[in-house]
Amino acid sequence: MIDRISLEALAEATEGLDASDVRLAMPNGMLADLLDVISPHVAADVLRALPQDVADSALESMEAAAEVAPLMAYEDDGAVGLMTPEFIAIHETVTVSQAMSFIRTWAEEYGAANISQVFLVDNDGVVTGTASLSQLVLARPFHDVSLIMNRDVISVATGTDQKEVARIMKRHDIHRLPVVDDANRIVDMVVIDDIIDVFEHQATEDMFRMIGVDQGERALGPFWRSVRSRLPWLCVNLATAIAAGLVITLYQSTMIQAVALAAFLPVIAGQGGIAGTQTLTLIVRSIALGELATGNAKRLLLKEAGLGLIHGIVVGLLVAGIAFAWKGNPWLALVVGLAMTANMMVAGVSGVLVPLGLRALKIDPGLASAVAVTTATDVIGFLIYLGLATLMITLIVG
C-alpha cells in the first residue's frame, strides 16, 4: 500500500484531470483509497464516470462513502456537484453559549479549518438565517442566536447550474453558499474554493470554444482526439474563406484595372477581424459572467459602433497615408481609408450582434461567434472596399 504522503500527492495530481481520466491515471487497486483523499464532489464525479459495477465496488470500500454517495444522485454540473459536507446548522432557538459548545464539539471531530459561519434552521429544517463565528464570539453567552443572526439568506436550489452558482457568489461576495431542496431545507454547502475551479473551467471552456478546440484537449493529449477536435472547425472556416473569395471574383474587372487594390485586401480583412475579435471576446466574457442584460443591448451596440468609428478613422488615415506614399494615388488612398473605417464599424457592430443573437436563439455564443464575426468582417469588408473601388475606378486608374 502506498503511504499517505504519496497518496495525497497522487490525489492532488488527479484533481485536475477529467473524471473519466482518473481511473487511467492511478495504479490498480487504489481507486477507493484515492477517492477517500480527494474532495467529495470530485470523488462523486469520478464514480459517475465509471462503469456501474466498478463504481459500486469502489464506493463499498470507501471510508467516506457516507459523504460521497448522496452527491452521486445529482447532475455533476449542478450546485450539488460542487458541495462539501462540512457545514454547521443549529436550531434558531439555542443560546450563544449552546451554539459555541456545539461548534467546539464539531471542530474536535471534523477540524476547525472551515468554520466561519453557521446556519440557523427551524423545527422543519428550513434555513432561517446565518451567523458568523465572529458574531457568536462577541455576543453575550445567554442571548439567543436569533438576536444576532442575519435573516437575509442567499441560497441556491440543488439543480442550479454551477456557472450561475459562481455568478451569485461573485455578485454577493460570499465565501459559503447553502444549497437547499424544494422545501428550503439546507442540503449542503458550496465553498469558494470549489467556485474558483468553476471560474477556471469556464474561462478555459469559453477560450477553447471561441477558437474551435475541444475543452478536453490537452497539449500532449491523444493525437487523433486533437484531429477530431480541430478539423471540423477548420472546414467551417474554409467554407467562410471561400465565401469571402467569391466576393472578390465579383469584382474581377475592377481588380484587373487596378492591380494595386489587391495589396490592401488582407489589410482591410485583417484589421476588421482583429477589431471584431476584441469586441467579441469582451461580449462573450460579459455574457458568461452574467454582466449583460437584454436591456443593455442598444447602449452596448451604440458604444461599440462609436468605438469602431473612432478606431476606423485613426487606422483609416494611417493606411490611407501609407497607400498614398506607396502608390502616389490619392483616390486609391481615399478608397482604402474609407473602406477601413467602414469595416472597423462593421467589426464592432458584428462583435455585439452575433453573440447576443446566438444567445437569443439559445445557442452558446462562445461556440460559433468567432467564425461568424470573421466571416462578416471579411465578406462585408471586401464588398465595401471593392464596391467603392468600382464606383471610383475611373479616378483611380486615370
Image (cartoon, rainbow, N blue to C red):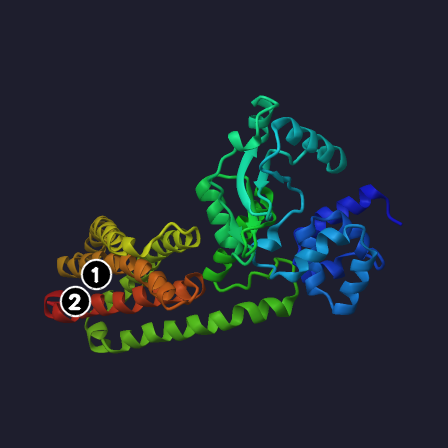
Left or right of 262 on screen, residue 131: right
- Left or right of 112? Residue 351 is left
Location of residue 264 with respect to 178 vertically, above or below: below
Q: Nearer the viewer, residue 385 or 283?
A: 283
258 left or right of 22 in image: left
The quadrant in which residue 389 appears is bottom left
Horizontal and vertical percent for residue 172? 45, 41
Please give the name of the residue rendered at 33% of the width and 57% of the height, measured from the top-left corner: 276
CA separation, marks 1 and 2? 8 Å
Pointers 1 and 2 in contact (CB under 8 A)? yes
Residue in the picture at 75% in, 33% down: 108
- 373 or 69: nearer the eye? 69
Label 2 CA crowd tier, 10 Å (few <14, some 14–19, many 20+):
some
Taking the image as drawn, is residue 267 in sight? Answer: no
Rendered residue at 83%/55% (across/down): 30
Marked residue nearer the N-terminal end (1 or 2): 1
Between residue 157 and residue 9, name the one nearer to us.
157
What's the amino acid at mark 1? Ala
**x then y, percent, for residue 250:** 24, 78
Please tell me the numbered disc located at residue 110.
none
Q: Which disc is residue 388 wearing?
A: 2
Q: Secondary structure at mark 1?
A: helix
Residue kind at label 2, given as amino acid type: Leu
Identify whether 353 is placed above or below 144. below
Residue, disc 1:
339
Q: Is residue 244 visible?
A: yes
Give the crowd class for mark 1: few <14, some 14-19, many >=20 residues within 10 Å. many
| Residue 27: x %, y % from top left | 82, 57
Figure check: 6 above or below 65:
above
Number of marks drawn:
2
Q: Measuring from the top left, give residue 67's x and y in whole percent.
A: 72, 51
Nearer to the camera, 199 or 144? 144
